[in-house]
Image (cartoon, grey):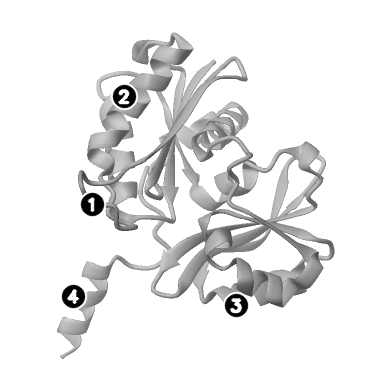
Amino acid sequence: MKVLGIDTSTALLSAAVLDDGRLAAESARESLQAGDRRPGRSNHAEGLIPLIEEVLAQAAVDLSSLSLLGVAVGPGSFTGLRIGISTAKGLVYGSDTPMVGVRTLEAVAYRVPPDDGAAFVCPLMDARKGEVYGALYRRTATGFECLIEDTVTAPESLVRQVEAAASAPCVFVGNGARAYADLIARCTGARARITTGDEFPTIASAIARIAEARFRATPETAAEPLTPHYIRPPDAVVGAGRDASR
């Protein structure tokens, strides 16, 4: 089975190809507008297709030979998620290639390999506005069990929830872990390990593996609507609601 995974949740785009369970290629690239190095100023539309073409070429896999496409559905950058999902739909348009949406936080947790030894994993993404996207997973013999569902909240609130729910040291992984490393250390002391995940496989590779496992177990998953999992409403929607209430 040949599986393409793509992630556009943050400014760090990633794409990966699995070929019969083997990671044949993966690549990540920061996507920023030309001449604009400010955080969050990403240009996913220009960076994604070249990245996909790169990993397909490295894996010697043609788009027409793909068995499955997995794509991040969020949470994350609202614009990035829309571009990722629309690109995925465009890539398979007119073909029978199935698609599976994968939640980003699940994929971030899945990046931590079993041999890492972590019993608990907290994927943490910077949601800006002084908030984080986060969840908590406990490793089991067959994978992960979700203890805290996807949420967006103040960093300290989530870290306190994790500290109360995790009965053993926890790995905090993601750009949110980097952004709030001091707070995590202050709240958890020696019970936490903090990493951006640079030493782990890409989010896209985790998406590909989750999508493949899910599709093999329940093929009807590919028939589910592919829509963004925002958690909180886009700014435009919030603004519209405020205007309507006046």
> SS for tag 3?
helix
Dot in front, 1 or 4: 1
Is 88 or 224 nearer to us in this picture? 88
Q: Residue at x 39, y 59 (%)?
A: 230
Three-letter code, disc 3: Glu
SS for dot 2: helix
Query: Hey, which residue is sitting farthest bottom in the picture?
Result: 246
**Residue 125 percent coordinates (x, y):** 50, 59
Q: Earlier in the sequence, mark 3 or mark 1?
A: 1
Q: Residues within 10 Å of mark 4 (few under 14, many from 20)?
A: few
Q: Is residue 185 above or below residue 70?
A: below
Q: Earlier in the sequence, mark 4 or mark 2?
A: 2
Kindly identify which residue carries mark 4.
240
- Mark nearest the camera among 3 and 2 is 3
- Is residue 17 among the parts visible in the rendering? no
Q: Could you say which is closer to the camera, residue 244 or residue 24?
A: 24
Q: Which residue is mark 3?
A: 156
Q: Which residue is mark 1?
A: 36
**C-beta proximity under 8 Å, tags 2 and 1:** no
Question: N-terminal of the two: label 4 or label 3?
Answer: 3
